[in-house]
């Protein structure tokens, strides 16, 4: 296989959700993997991340909630957030010149992309787990995020 063909194949794979590609013929064998498989599986099952992150946040956030105004108590009342399933950089839009995936007030469907988190030069689409309304964007564009950190405050519909 020529280099230009290999480059075209890699581009096709990176433009899709494919994480592993294998091709074999009599003369050569090609195996392309992208991203750590186990972390990607965790992204596909974000519900445990929400459950695991919530107890860790309550003790840290409790002192701030007691001393702040009524807005943080709204966060405590709703308790619904979309959290980052991985460590990386948060991006609100697919490219610098594009519009944001979502904005405050938008209603998003389950499975709809709400942002990207870049980890190890791979852009991972973060999707809504359920139909909801975006109440607040909790991170600035290009801000670093930790595993389980809230990205959006939402209201389940």
Image (spheres, helix red, strand yellow):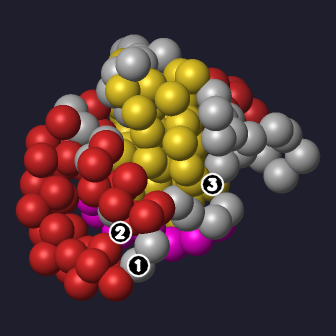
Q: Where is residue 94 in the image (x, y as percent from the top left)?
A: 71, 41
Towards the viewer: 116 or 76:
76
Whole-angstrom CA distance, mark 3 to mark 1, is 28 Å
Q: Where is residue 60 in the image (x, y as percent from the top left)?
A: 21, 80
Secondary structure under badge 1? loop
Towards the viewer: 83 or 62:
62
* Residue identified by numbered label 1: 68
Secondary structure under badge 2? loop
**73 above or below 136?**
below
Q: Which residue sits at x=83%, y=52%?
A: 96
Query: Is label 2 in contact with label 1 (beta carbons under 8 Å)?
Result: no
* Residue identified by numbered label 3: 91
Query: Is label 2 in contact with label 3 (beta carbons under 8 Å)?
Result: no
Looking at the rendering, which quadrant does residue 63 occupy? bottom left
Quadrant for the N terminus in the image? top right
Taking the magenta stretch, the answer to whether it contains residue 145 is yes
> Closer to the N terminus: mark 2 or mark 3?
3
What secondary structure do most residues of the magenta stretch adopt?
Answer: loop
Looking at the rendering, which quadrant does residue 54 occupy? bottom left
**3 or 1: mark nearer the eye:** 1
Decide if residue 123 is in sight here: no
> Closer to the N terminus: mark 3 or mark 1?
1
Range covered by the magenta-colored residues: 142-148
């Amino acid at each position: 296989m020529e280099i230009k063909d290999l480059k075209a194949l890699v581009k096709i794979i990176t433009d899709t959700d494919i994480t592993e590609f294998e091709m074999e013929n009599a003369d050569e064998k090609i195996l392309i993997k992208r991203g750590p498989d186990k972390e990607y599986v965790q992204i596909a099952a974000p519900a445990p991340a929400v459950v695991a992150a919530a107890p860790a946040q309550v003790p840290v956030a409790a002192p701030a909630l007691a001393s702040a105004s009524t807005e943080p108590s709204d966060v405590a009342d709703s308790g619904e957030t979309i959290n980052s399933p991985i460590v990386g950089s948060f991006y609100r839009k697919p490219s610098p010149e594009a519009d944001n995936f979502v904005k405050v007030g938008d209603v998003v469907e389950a499975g709809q992309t709400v942002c990207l988190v870049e980890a190890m030069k791979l852009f991972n689409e973060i999707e809504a787990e359920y139909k909801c309304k975006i109440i607040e964007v909790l991170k600035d564009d290009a801000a670093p995020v930790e595993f389980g950190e809230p990205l959006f405050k939402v209201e389940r519909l």
